[in-house]
Image (tube, rainbow, N blue to C red):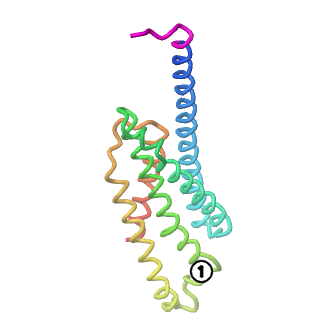
Amino acid sequence: MKVPSKPARRAVWGGFFVVLLIAIVYYTWLVLSVRSELRTMQKQAAIIKSSLISGNTATASQALVRFSAAAADARSHTSSPGWKVLGVLPWVGHNTKVATTVSNVGVQIAANAVAPAIDDAKGNIIHELAPHDGGVNLALIRGLQPTLARIDAALQQAGQQIDGINTSGLFGFVGTPLNKLRTELNSACARAV
């Protein structure tokens, strides 16, 4: 059996290191992208919450667009084949699965809870719900019930998905948004009851 020449061995090792370098760059980009998207979701969620509380639906709508885009991008990255490969690695796999769940829940919350809440809050609904001339507009409240039930169901489902996650051993960029999302979902679910 003929042993490969020294230049051939160098070419093989060189090719191996080039492929390894490309893989490192790709996975670094992938992880940093997901981290950035999770942070954007976290920041925009805070803006949405404060805007809805203050009745500023225009700001809430703008923040929802950014939140939805970040959640969709995170879901796209966390459902990629490269991300799934990370999922089988020890110490990393649990984090990738949690990031995937958080991004999926973010997309669900944006579409099924936040968007309907913003749609219903548009206009002067807070003012319309306040008592006028000693009475409350019950027809308006009844009209909101189907939307509120849909929002509550979406929040409950998201809360169950997030509450079922084991947080031990999570990296900060995954654990912090997860814990913030868990806190906000529990708070929203408690208010909805």
Identified at 52% across, 64% down, the residue is 110
Q: Is residue 48 left or right of residue 107?
A: right
Quadrant where the C terminus is found in the figure:
bottom left
Identified at 39% across, 40% down, the residue is 87
Quadrant where the N terminus is found in the figure:
top left
Residue that badge 1 annotates:
125
The amino acid at mark 1 is Ile
Query: Camera-side residue: 50 or 107?
Result: 107
Q: Is residue 56 above or below residue 37?
A: below
Identified at 54% across, 13% down, the residue is 8
Q: In the rendering, at what x and y percent does residue 113 appear?
A: 49, 69
Q: In the rendering, at what x and y percent does residue 112 appear?
A: 48, 69
Query: Camera-side residue: 177 or 107?
Result: 107
Query: Camera-side residue: 119 or 91?
Result: 91
Q: In the rendering, at what x and y percent does residue 92 appear?
A: 40, 35
- Residue 6 in the magenta stretch? The answer is yes
- Residue 76 in the magenta stretch? The answer is no
Q: Is residue 121 above or below residue 188?
A: below
User: How many numbered circles does the render carry?
Assistant: 1
Which of the 4 quarters of the picture holds residue 163?
Answer: bottom left
Q: Is residue 1 above or below residue 166?
A: above
Q: In the rendering, at what x and y percent does residue 73 appear?
A: 56, 53
Q: Residue furthest front?
A: 1
Q: Which residues are magenta?
A: 1-9
Which of the 4 quarters of the picture holds residue 71?
Answer: bottom right
Badge 1: how crowded within 10 Å, few (<14), some, or many (20+)?
A: few
Q: Secondary structure at mark 1?
A: helix
Q: Is residue 77 left or right of residue 98?
A: right
